[in-house]
Image (cartoon, rainbow, N blue to C red):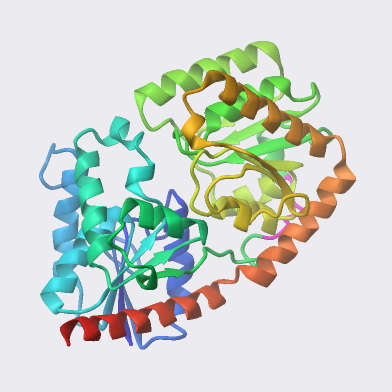
Amino acid sequence: MRVSILTREYPPYIYGGAGVHVGQLVPQLRKFTDSVDVQCMGEPRDGATAHAEDYPEGANAALRTLGADIAMAAAIPEVDVVHAHTWYAQFAGIIAGQFQDIPTVVTAHSLEPDRPWKVEQLGGGYRVSSWIEKTAFESADAVIAVSAAMINNIQAAYPSVERDRIHVVKNGIDPEEFKPDPNTDVIESLGVDLSKPIVTFVGRITRQKGMVHLVRAAQMLDPDTQLLLLAGAPDTPEIAAEFDKAFADLNATRSGVKWVQEMLPRASVRQVLTHSTVFACPSIYEPLGIVNLEAMACEIPVVASAVGGIPEVVVDGETGLLVPYDPAKAGDPEFVASFERQFAEKLNELTRDRARARQMGLAGRQRCIDEFSWEKIAQETVEVYQAAIAHHKAKKG
């Protein structure tokens, strides 16, 4: 079987969960297929054919992505199946599938209808990205959901996608890459006190990740608890203004708050996670959440919002604690304040009981090893390719 993987991100240039997923999946797929071609976007790199997102010059970002998609589709060699990750690469998958008359597979890392705040970032490009995703899902021979919770989301967003075309293949973790690191040079350089509890967040400052909720919740953390935020610049001016105010209010009332805006190497993140007390994931939307697996693999417990696929990763009371969140009530100030208060209470619960936190951390790493290996995920993905090939043949009669 010859496969072409289409993606915006590919190592070493990755910024989100989809990039981590593809970077880990490709080497494992090569064990079970005849060949794996990789088409990506951005700077040239080893192991993939890269296409610049620079045409048409000066156009909306979504339109420049389409220019890269055309180049990507033209560069795909003769293959048996094409597999597109995120809307950024799905237009290339649509074109390649038609041009070569081959089956297409798409992975639902997230869904555009479930992320309306993206209009702040893309403007009219959000309508373009939504149209691309809708077209890709409706025409795909197989759709991969990264969690069981995503099945209902997919069918709610795209009712014409039959259930038998949807296959659950969860994200994974490499427990040899993410494992406890006893060294302390990196985390000490960030200026934290290792003798005091540390609550850590790793992620982007977007509406989706709920970081503003965490910063507000931190007002209610115990005085000796530190908050370490590994997060780049906010996505949009609106988010920046909201976050900057919350962060300034927090800094004015307590010490021990650190915001690291540079993107640390994955090895450095691993060390930071190892020496943290609790990992915080206040996402308001999360199809699965690889970052929680990374924290668990480093033997720390997770306090997370119970949305999307997170409950399929974090076992409440065993590998961490979950806080209920209802996206439908996002505009209700009373509900939001209650969520932030409960999030703080769960964090305090674990920072006050280090023995319990340690027990949860150990259980979390074992869960990663038992349930989320990339080799297993690659085998399941190949089975989806086989189903897609069969579906494509059936369509043609």
The residue shown at (69%, 55%) is: 296
Q: Would you say residue 160 is visible in this rendering?
A: yes
Question: Nearest the camera: 186 or 327?
Answer: 327
* Side (left or right) of 69 relative to 237: left
Q: Residue pushed farthest top?
A: 252
* Side (left or right) of 15 relative to 320: left
The residue shown at (31%, 30%) is: 120
The residue shown at (55%, 77%) is: 376
Relative to 223, is 321 above or below?
Answer: below
Q: Residue 313 occupies which quadrant of the picture?
A: bottom right
The mark tally for this picture is 0
Q: Would you say residue 42 is visible in this rendering?
A: no
Question: Nearest the camera: 225 or 306?
Answer: 306
Question: Nearest the camera: 5 or 376?
Answer: 376
Q: Position of residue 364 (x, y in %)?
A: 73, 58
Relative to 186, is 238 above or below?
Answer: above
Q: Position of residue 238 (x, y in %)?
A: 37, 22
- Magenta residues: mostly which secondary structure? loop
Q: Is residue 183 magenta?
A: yes
Image quadrant containing the N terminus: bottom left
The residue shown at (72%, 61%) is: 365
Q: Is residue 332 magenta?
A: no
Q: Residue 305 occupies which quadrant of the picture?
A: top right
Q: Position of residue 220 (x, y in %)?
A: 72, 21
* Side (left or right) of 191 relative to 360: left
What's the magenta region? 179-184
Q: Position of residue 200 (x, y in %)?
A: 66, 38
Image quadrant containing the C terminus: bottom left
